[in-house]
Image (cartoon, grey):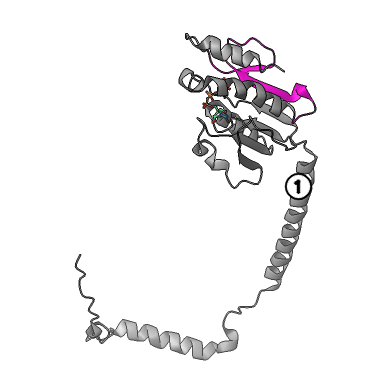
């Protein structure tokens, strides 16, 4: 790409055009005006009494805002926050649940081995002080303190749960036992299951009306706490 050379035309500064009589008269008039009133009569730049008053009330307003912010923080602290853990929180259903919990102001921990889940499903929360993402396979124990668990970590669709059936059964049994071990009150433990699994503890997520549904059904049935 070619650039046009920048030429500064000095002749523009030395205009040949003479000021008109009107322009000269204006400049004369201004010069006379300011020589008459003198510098002391120029408008003062220091604040007037009224402006002083305004600044004072501005300070007071800022103090009030600070006080209100502090009281708001106090109130926020009194609202019971939950510390829920979402296993499989990087998956389709899990990430929507995470959004909901985060929007409600809870401190959310996501545990996922990214078998089918994706970081991008929760990336908008990464860096948020209430959010933590742990790359972990629930088949191995995990020792963290939470006060509620939404257990969604499981291969969800036939190609995924049939990919390694033994591992699927391990995830849904050993994995679930591991997650249960994290929480003292099992009433605060919810499992996501498809509609075939009839249990009050289940959060129904999908209808798995296919030949292999029985496999995931049996596997998930073992999850029931
Ligand atoms: O061993 C595993 C398997 C899977 N996962 C995770 O579990 C999540 C499953 O989410 P997917 O997007 O694949 O599937 P869905 O969100 O549709 O499944 C959801 O509804 C159906 C239920 O049976 C599933 O338990 C629930 O997660 C993924 O993030 C996956 O990485 C684990 O963390 N560990």
Quarter holding the N terminus? bottom left
Helix, strand or loop at label 1? It is helix
Q: Where does ligand 1 appear, by image quarter? A: top right
The residue lying toward the viewer, choosing from 185 and 81, is 185
Where in the figure is residue 66, as x and y percent of width and height?
74, 55
The residue indicated by pointer 1 is 73
Tell me which corner region of the image, top left, top right, bottom left or bottom right, holds residue 39: bottom right
Which stretch is magenta? Answer: 182-207
103 relative to 172, above or below? below
Where in the figure is residue 224, as x and y percent of width and height?
69, 16
69 relative to 175, above or below? below
Residue most extreme to the front:
166
The residue lying toward the viewer, choosing from 95 and 61, is 95
Where in the figure is residue 144, as x and y percent of width and height?
73, 38
192 relative to 75, above or below? above
Tell me which corner region of the image, top left, top right, bottom left or bottom right, holds residue 169: top right
Where in the figure is residue 196, as x and y percent of width and height?
58, 9
């Amino acid at each position: 790409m070619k650039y046009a050379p920048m030429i500064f035309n000095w002749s523009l500064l030395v205009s040949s055009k003479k000021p008109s009589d009107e322009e000269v008269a204006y400049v004369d008039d201004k010069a006379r005006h300011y020589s008459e009133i003198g510098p002391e009569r120029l408008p003062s730049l220091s604040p007037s009494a009224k402006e002083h008053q305004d600044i004072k009330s501005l300070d007071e307003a800022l103090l009030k805002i600070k006080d209100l912010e502090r009281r708001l923080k106090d109130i926020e602290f009194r609202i019971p926050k939950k510390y829920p853990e979402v296993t499989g929180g990087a998956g389709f259903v899990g990430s929507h649940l995470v959004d909901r919990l985060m929007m409600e102001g809870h401190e959310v921990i996501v545990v996922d081995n990214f078998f089918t889940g994706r970081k991008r499903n929760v990336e908008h929360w990464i860096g948020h002080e209430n959010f933590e993402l742990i790359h972990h396979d629930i088949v191995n124990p995990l020792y963290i303190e939470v006060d509620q668990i939404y257990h969604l970590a499981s291969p969800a669709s036939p190609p995924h749960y049939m990919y390694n059936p033994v591992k699927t059964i391990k995830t849904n049994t050993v994995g679930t036992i591991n997650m249960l071990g994290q929480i003292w009150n099992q009433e605060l433990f919810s499992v996501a299951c498809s509609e075939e699994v009839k249990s009050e503890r289940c959060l129904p997520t999908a209808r798995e009306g296919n030949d292999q549904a029985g496999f995931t059904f049996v596997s998930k049935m073992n999850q029931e706490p």
